[in-house]
Structure formats: structure tokens, C-alpha cells
Amino acid sequence: MGYCLKRILVLLTGGLMFVALCGGLVLTKEKPYQGVPLRIALVAGFTECPPLLDALIEASKELGTEIKAAQYSFDELHDKLLVDYVGGNPAWDIVFVHVGSRAKWVESGLITPIGKWTDEHPDLVNADLLAIDDFYDISIKNYTYKGTWLGPSLYVTGVTLFYRTDLFNHPTEQKNFKARYGYELGPPETYKQFRDVAEFFTRKKGEVLAGKILESDFYGTAHSNKPVGFLWHDFVNYLMAFGADNIYDPQTLRPTFNSPEAIAAGKYFISLAPFLPPGHMSMTSGQSTSMFAQGYVAMIVEYFLRCTEMVLNPEQSKVSDKVDFTLLPSVEGVQGRKHAAHFGGNCVALYSLSPNKEAAYKTIELAFSRRIQKKVLLEKYAPFGWVPPRPSVLGDPEVQRAVPWLRAAVSKLLAPEDIYYFELPALPEYFHAMDIAGGALSKALAGEADVETAFNEAQLELEKLFKKAGYIK
């Protein structure tokens, strides 16, 4: 193995290091944040967290910071950060911000939004790296609270409908479906059709599906109904499609969880239970998506990012070459809510008690740069597994060669003008309200109360919460 002569000359003046390598002179700055520890709080099992961590680690290699990550469940993260903040514990530097928590965390002072920090420290901002204009507009909009940008979103696109093309296109299944329901089998455009399709494809072991005898039970659809977070993130798509408020009226701030529209959504959601795999009441989104990826489910309402990793990836999926995706169904007669879907994304911000805010910001800034985002995608997540939040990365020639389907897929989901993408409300009490509403839905789903009773009880709790907050009398 050959080697080249290395000469290293260190000049202390000006803090610069000149390194002569293989006869070539390279001028570099010393790592400005060498040895600064950065503690990151993440959610275990969220598909966007591994790419985030990888990007932060890549940035830390250049800046000298030391990344130390801790992962919690969705609910644990929320509670852990609140306890640490209230106790004055400077335990964190960078935190994963779930959209349902964002308003409360800003109002309480738990996080320092990236936009606030950059406004206060413009001399430390590298505009070319931050490249605000190179995030999708919907990402900037959804992660801006009271005019302040919270931080970069971790991916783009939201909830979509994935379905088995081999089943939907099978001649016998098409013939039988039309004979039974009176219209052509296809990706459901309405939730009435969605229920019909879910019912039709639910089969028992020993029955025939697409010309083959089933060796195990098969299900029309799947949900992650583990309370409260997983259940709510599935149900909220139905709630909005049915024309209901997202727990409360945004104009009057009065809870409306027992409205006719909300109750209709709840009844419909529960009507799907016979077509779901057993154990759905304790399933996470990873588990329900895995059921689809392993070939036990006909269609699923799920985040596009999770399905790219688990369903389109042939290393994890048995149906990767037998699926397609489309926009979510709509409810007939409901205006302005066509294809209603949660946009999702989540973001990162600075922990307000961090003693290392400057190093934390610079690490985030570099981690979300076009160069690092592209590097992480190509080296670790292509061709499946992540959808970076920057259009320029998706349009990069190297990325298009490595992931030829990705930019077209994102355009398919974001381009339609009539799609109703929504985000969880930016209200400090929303996370608590979600617990109340989701708990009521879980109670009804378990058969412990009918939907009207459960939702009426939740309405009373929500009114108490909103009265205490001073929103209503």
C-alpha cells in the first residue's frame, strides 16, 4: 500500500491551520465547536427521526460538536421535556417538536424557535446554508407560530392511501365486487366506497383471494388504534373529512366534539373495526403498516413517509411491486374538505434552557443544508426511506437518478389544488384536548360506551379545559 508524504504546518496566528497533503495545500478553519456536547430528544419509532439524527451527526463531524441522542415514546417525550423545563433542568439542546405540542412549548418558553434565534443573532446565520426559500411553502406555513418560524420540518408530504394493485386489478375480484356493490372496483374516492372495499376484501383463512386459497385471515384495512397518539393521528383524517372541527371551533374557541359531524365520523370509524386485524387496539403505526407490507391487508391510510420505508422497500415488504398510492377519499356532500389529510412533518427547535444554543443552531443549520440532506439521502435512505423537505434536493440530478420516482410522487400528492391538507391546531391546550378526545374515541372503540355518550362526556371535559384556559365562559 503506497503513501504520500504529509507535511503539516500549524500557524497559530489568525487561528488558521494550513495542511499540506500529498503536495497540495488545503486551507481550513479549526472546528469552531470542538467538543461541545449536544443532547437531542427524539421520538422512538418515528420514521423521520433516524434521518434527522444522521444529518445532525454529519454536521457534527464538520463542526466538532458531539451528538448524544435519547429516544422516548411520543407521550413520554412530551411529559419528559415539560418536567425538565419546569424543573429548570438544562438537560437538552435540540428537541423534536411534535406539531400538537408546538403552541404549548412556545407559549411556556420550553423551546426557542429557530426563527427567533436567527432574528436575534443575524451575524451567526449562514443564509446559504439555512436557505429558507428552499423549503416547501406548506412546511414553512405549518411550522410558523404567531409569525415566528419554529424550525425546519423533517420531511414533506402527509397521509395517503396505499392499496394493493394486484387485488384491485384482478378480473375475478372486479367482477365479484361489481356484482355485490353495483359499481366498479377501484381506489375509493369516497369513504362510503372505502368501507365497501374494506368489507369486500376481508376474508377468512381457506377462502379464495385473487385466485389463491388464503393460508391466513386477510383484512380490508388496518389502523394503529393504540391510544392516544397513534389512534388520534389516524382518526383525525376522518374527523376532518366529515366536516367536523378539529376538536374546537377555531373562530369561537368553543369545543365541538359532540357535533353531528364529529359523532358521524366516530361512528364511521368504529364501523371499520370488523375489517381490521385483531389487536388493532394496541397497534402502533409501525405495526399496522407492517401488516400491510407483509401482505395481510388490502389498503391502508398512513403517512407517505412511513410507507416509503416499509411498503415500497422490497427489503422490508412482500408487496413492494404490487402497490400504488393516491389521495385520501372524501365524504360526499361535505364542501371544502376534498381528500382531507393531515400534512404531518414535525420539526426541530432549540431547547430554551440549553447552555449551547449557538453550537446547537449551527449544527441544525448545517444538518439541514442542501449538501448534508442530499448526502444523507443518497448514502443511507435511497431509494426508499425518507422524503427530504427541500425541493432542490428532490430535483437534484443525482437524487433523481438514485430515486427516480420520488419527485413525481411528491408532486402527485402536493400538486392538486383541491386537496385539503390540514395541520393540528396551534393551541397550547391542544395536546391535552387530544388526550381527552382520543380517550373518548378509544372508549367507544372498545365497546365501553356508545359514540354519543363517549363524545358527550368528552365535550364536558373539553369545556372545563377551555374555560380554565379562559377561552370560553
Image (tube, rainbow, N blue to C red):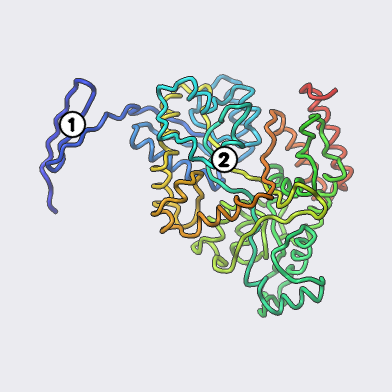
Disc 2 on helix, strand or loop?
A: helix
Q: Nearer the viewer, residue 267 or 92?
A: 267
Callout 1: 10 Å neighbours few (<14), some, many (20+)? some
Task: Estimate the x, y position of residue 147 in percent, counting from the top left.
Answer: 60, 27
Query: Looking at numbered disc 1 in the image, what kind of residue is underneath it?
Result: Phe
Task: Estimate the x, y position of residue 243 in percent, counting from the top left.
Answer: 80, 45
Q: Residue at x 61, y 51 (%)?
A: 303
Q: Residue at x 71, y 79 (%)?
A: 172
- Rounded to the nearest whole Å, what is the CA distance between mark 1 and mark 2? 42 Å
Q: Is residue 333 above or below residue 5?
A: below
Which of labels 1 and 2 is toward the front?
A: 2
Quarter holding the C terminus is top right
Residue linked to disc 2: 137
Query: Looking at numbered disc 2 in the image, what kind of residue is underneath it?
Result: Asp
Q: Is residue 276 left or right of residue 290?
A: right
Disc 1 on helix, strand or loop?
A: strand
Q: Nearer the viewer, residue 461 or 331?
A: 331
Residue linked to disc 1: 18
Task: Estimate the x, y position of residue 313 in percent, counting from the top left.
Answer: 51, 61
Q: Dots 1 and 2: beta carbons under 8 Å?
A: no
Q: Looking at the rendered structure, which numbered label has been put on residue 373?
A: none
Work out whether mark 1 precedes mark 2 in sequence or the reverse, and give the earlier one.
Answer: 1
Q: Is residue 212 left or right of residue 120?
A: right
Q: Is residue 98 left or right of residue 461?
A: left
Quarter holding the N terminus is bottom left
Callout 2: 10 Å neighbours few (<14), some, many (20+)? few
